Each structure stands twice: as C-alpha cells, then as structure tokens.
Amino acid sequence: MTYNIVTIVGSIRKQSFSLKIANALAKLAPDTLKLDVTTLQGISFFNQDLEAAPPADWLAFRDKLQKSNGVLFVTPEYNRSIPGVLKNAIDVGSRPYGKSSFNGKPTGIISNSPGPLGGVSAAKHLQNILPGIAGPILQQPEIYLNGVGDAFDEQGALVKEALKTVLQQYITAFAAHIEAHNR
C-alpha cells in the first residue's frame, strides 16, 4: 500500500530551504509513501467570521488533509518560532472547532536553519501546538537540520551527503510511523 502524506512547507520563499528539503524527502521516500509537497501561498488568512461559509482555499486545504494518511511539517524558524503562514495554515486546517482536519493523522516535524541551531525552537513550538488537533507525532528520531545553506546545488538538488543520510534515516522511521498508525 502507498500512503499519501501532505508535506507542508513552512516557508513561501521561492528558494526556501524547507521546500528543497521537502522535495529531497519526496525523492528519498520509500515506495510506501507518496509525499504531496504543499506550499501555503494560496491559503487566505484565518478569520472565524468566515467559518459559516469558508473560502474555497480553506475547503481545498482541509479536504487534502482529510484524504491523507499523514502530515509532515518541514519548517524554518522565524524569530524563535514558526512562520506566520504556517501558523495560519494550522489554524485553517484545525477548524471548525472539534473537527480538525489534522485529527488522528500521524505527524512528523522537521525544522531547519542555515545557522547552528537547526530551527529547534520552531520544532518545539509545533510540538506545543499540535497535540489536541493532530495525531501522534513521531518522537524518534527528532530532526533539527542546521547548516543547510550549502546542502543544495543551483537546481535545488541535495548535494550534502551528511544531510542525505540524516533525511534517509528520518523518512524511513517516518514511513514506519505512518504504517503503524494506518492499520
């Protein structure tokens, strides 16, 4: 069986490291996973006033999540937290109250940074936000990717072997996590 994974990219920058990492993971994933790399440019701001008649972009995002077998977040760290576009997408996907589209979906978190800390604060914030609206979060291995600035060539292909090894280990563990929670 192949499991469909919504892979949410936490940055909307065209050359974002998160997007490059998500695309690299899609290539490294075992045949049991199909990573649907999802950027957040098209998701309008959450406003509870619109919940009675949600915008089409909200409905499409929620539907994509509901039809998936799991969710993988790949995010940078902005000011010791997650980017606003990612928090907005989580707010859109988790509503209406009690009907989160993330509910029950096995989840993974990958943070990254060109700096030395690997976006650990962003990952920790996701670990605080997701319980109660999402499914079980992969606990081990934790993955905070630092020094990603030189990991990709001009075409966005992964060229840093050490990072490739870490991503391969993670996606293999994530595949087992997905299978265990989709029986």
Image (spheres, rainbow, N blue to C red):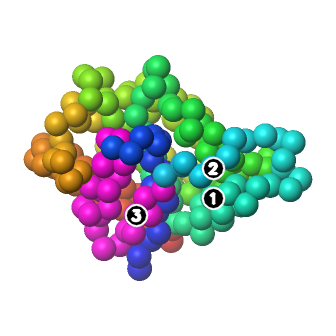
**Which residue, given by chain and number where applicable, does mark 2 sit on?**
43
**Residue type indicated by callout 3:** Leu
* Above or below: residue 120 compared with residue 167: above
Q: Nearer the viewer, residue 131 or 75?
A: 75
Q: Are marks 1 and 3 in contact (CB under 8 Å)?
A: no
Q: Secondary structure at mark 3?
A: strand
Q: Circle 3 sits on which residue?
A: 35
Report the side of 67 relative to 23 (left or right): right
Tell me the magenta residue range: 16-38
For the residue labelled by badge 2, is the local secondary structure a helix, a strand or a loop?
loop
Q: Residue 15, relative to residue 81: is it above or below?
A: below
Instruction: Choose the circle earlier in sequence order: 1 or 2.
Output: 2
Q: Are marks 1 and 2 in contact (CB under 8 Å)?
A: yes
Mark 2 to mark 3 CA distance (whole Å): 19 Å
Q: Which mark is residue 61?
A: 1
Task: Between residue 29 and residue 175, name the one nearer to us.
Answer: 29
Which amino acid type corresponds to the residue marked 1 in the rendered image?
A: Phe
Q: CA distance from mark 1 to mark 2?
A: 8 Å
Crowd around label 2: few <14 · some 14–19 · many ≥20 (10 Å)? some
> In this rendering, would 179 be left or right of 168?
right
- Of the 4 image quadrants, the one containing the N terminus is bottom left
Real-space CA distance between mark 1 and mark 3, rounded to the nearest whole angstrom: 15 Å
From the top left corner, tell me how far across and down residue 176 is, in percent. Answer: 36, 61
> Vertical placement of 16 versus 107: above or below?
above
